[in-house]
Image (cartoon, coloured by chain):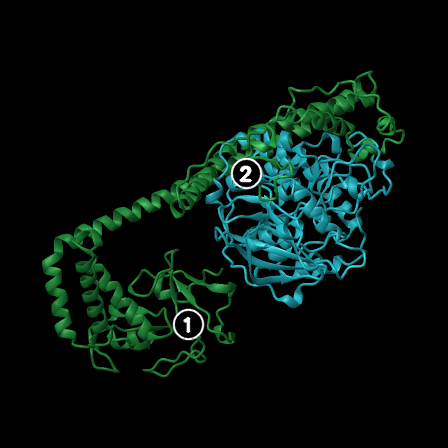
Amino acid sequence: MDAVERENQDRQKRWAKEQKVGEGAYAVVYRGREFSTGRRVAIKKIKVGQFKDGLDMSAIREVKYLRELKHQNVIELLDVFSNKTNLNLVLEFLDSDLEMIIKDRSLVFLPADIKSWMAMTFRGLEFCHRNFILHRDLKPNNLLIASDGQLKIADFGLARDFADPGFKMTCQVITRWYRPPELLFGSRYYSSAVDIWSLGCIFAELMLRTPYLAGESDMDQLKTIFRALGTPTEQEWPGHTKLPDYVPVGQFPKTPLRDLFTAASADTLNLLSKCLLYEPRKRLSASEALHHPYFFAIPHPTHPSKLPKCTTQMAPRPLGEVDGNVDMVGSGPGVKAAAPNKGRLKRKITSPLDDPKTRSIARKLDFTKHVKSP
Amino acid sequence: MATKSNYGWLQGRTVRKGGHASSNSHTRSNTPQVQSTSTTIFGGGIKDPSGRTSEYFSMDDQCPVCKSDRYLNPKLRLLVSSCYHKMCESCIDRLFTLGPASCPNCDKILRKLAFSPQTFEDLGVEKEVAVRRRIAKEFNKRLEDFDDLRSYNDYLEEVEDIAFNLINNIDIPATEERIAAYKAANAALTSLNLQREEAEALALKEQEDLERREREARAAQLAQQEQQEREERQREERELIDKLETSQKDAHKIVAKSRIAAAKRSSARAASSSANSSLLGMSFGMDYAKLLKTRTTKVNNVPDEPHVPFLDDYYAYDDLYTVRAEGYDDIISEAVRRDREGIMRAGGYKVEEAWNRALLTAVAGLDAAPLSGLDEPNSLGDVDVVMESV
């Protein structure tokens, strides 16, 4: 037995695998425990041997970036070890996600709660951007909530580091409802501003308790955005007509955000509008957002331990429902290049309050094409 | 609504529900209700909030005494005696005009004045309501009149007992005696509570009046505002037309000018109306405070702290380098900087981010302590440099 194998075995011994939580085509998720401390963890076993092309892209991405990131508001990858032909990722165990909380109609959100969640999300995202990593799949069900109320960004299956000048990136990232217009127009050169748009959508969703810009297809998504925020002019967003997939979608007038967010304060709408600016370079950066007056205004953000928690217990997910494209059967429109990961499997349990109508629509949307991102 | 008096001798105003103005009531198939404000000889019945007594009324009504029914006499009105037997108005007139007489059903001595209109179809309910009303008038003690909850509950139990006896005709003389005894013992307190109730009712009414007046004032103000606006608009139009007639200037310019002026005025109006609506915001704030309070009592009491942008001790290394404001002339980013099509700019790509990254990675960790200084190996293995925070 060589040194590498021994090291690997030592690591494996630290973690106890308990019951299966879910299974996908390329990964199985177990609940687990650390032997020495009894700490709860989630162990994601990735089946390697079955794939011709080797390891799944999103697994590589997840390991690559999570290994580098350690922050209060980013999910922690505790360990990686291999076992026969499988790769095992040991991740922090988290009880619920923001989507479950948004959908739980029994919970009442105070403005201070929303402020607290947004501050935590921006902190997590700022940490990623500070380390030159784009998340590229921010949405409520990728924002997990720990038992102490801390919000953690998870699912780095679509993440990548900032591109070097002149290098193309794929535009088929980010779940449709949270995808910024520059990606919908097929831009291959973009920046951290794409994640900020997603956060803007999440911010609005927290206030509305329903997805803000829910388009039924990529085309419809643009239409939905323009209907909500007005068609951008050349002045507002210089050069957008030159983007590869630019199509004129139609002229829609600008309606003030105030019309929809009637109860929001002026600060709130200011931050929201700056996250949802058409011109990506003018969009707020995560660190600028954290210094926005909205966060300093009264009421103070709710202490994480006092934030509303999901009342519905997570039931073990029926295994029949889990397949390789777990993301796609979810309640949101899937990201095409996505593949299941531990967090997602664990979170896939849809709450009983889930509206079957929206779900069926969401299901219809997906499986359109399956484009791999680089 | 018809205010036609079907019951002329009652001088009462009769209001029919549902707009049935006709008096040929036998054409109705359902059982509508007749409401009467009869404050004349009959005192009973249940009054609705507007002060009217609603009367039970059905097509199948028949006087048990003279067997006359609604088909023969559309104006038939049945009243209830104090022994809870129904008879029609003409029978009452016939039997009791000459003074007290016995009830044709149960031989109880009745007077003409002791008949009351019927509100409920079921006479049992009618009786229960009447009994409870009577009891409530006498037995009006409150929780604060008792030393403890226990004795108050005992009192309520006793009241319920008496009411039950009266409703179901159990031991009537004994029960009446109990009531009389109670009345004698508590006369002072009863009258005091009666006064209190009246005062409370009055206060409530005043409060309602105040609210109503406020609402009316607000509506009047709004109407006035609208009227003003309308007049102003008309005046503007007239002025504009006059100006166009008389002035030598370009017509377009005049129109544009007046438009700007109009926009200014309307924005000023909007500002003043928003100042008015601040009152509304205050009440919302109170609601919010209440909600907040319920929340804080429910869960632990960790105070909410003011926002701090970064909770980790983050060091940006920005004192170790500066990014040149005019950018860099590097070969790699040449295409991006030129960006002939403008698509990189439109997509939001920032070459500054790449420069920043290059500079930061060049200087980051220059003064970091060597890794061997770490006490315990990181869980991911001590060969990796982990970007750690918090």
- Toward which corner of the image does residue A180 lie, by quadrant? top right
Task: Identify residue for label 1.
Answer: B57
Q: Which residue sits furthest right?
A: B340
Instruction: Identify residue type, mark 1.
Output: Phe
Q: Is residue A270 above or below residue A93?
A: above
Instruction: Identify residue type, mark 2.
Output: Lys
Q: Is residue B85 above or below residue B22?
A: below
Helix, strand or loop status at disc 2 = helix
Q: Is residue B67 above or below residue B290?
A: below
Q: Residue at x 34, y 70 (%)?
A: B118
Task: Identify residue for label 2.
Answer: A115
Query: Residue B344 placed where, x, y %?
Result: 83, 33
- Left of A323 or right of it: where is A245? right
Helix, strand or loop status at disc 1 = loop
On what subunit does the disc labeled 1 rest?
A: B
Q: Residues within 10 Å of mark 2 (few under 14, many from 20)?
A: many
**Display colour for chain B:** green
Q: Which chain is cyan?
A: A
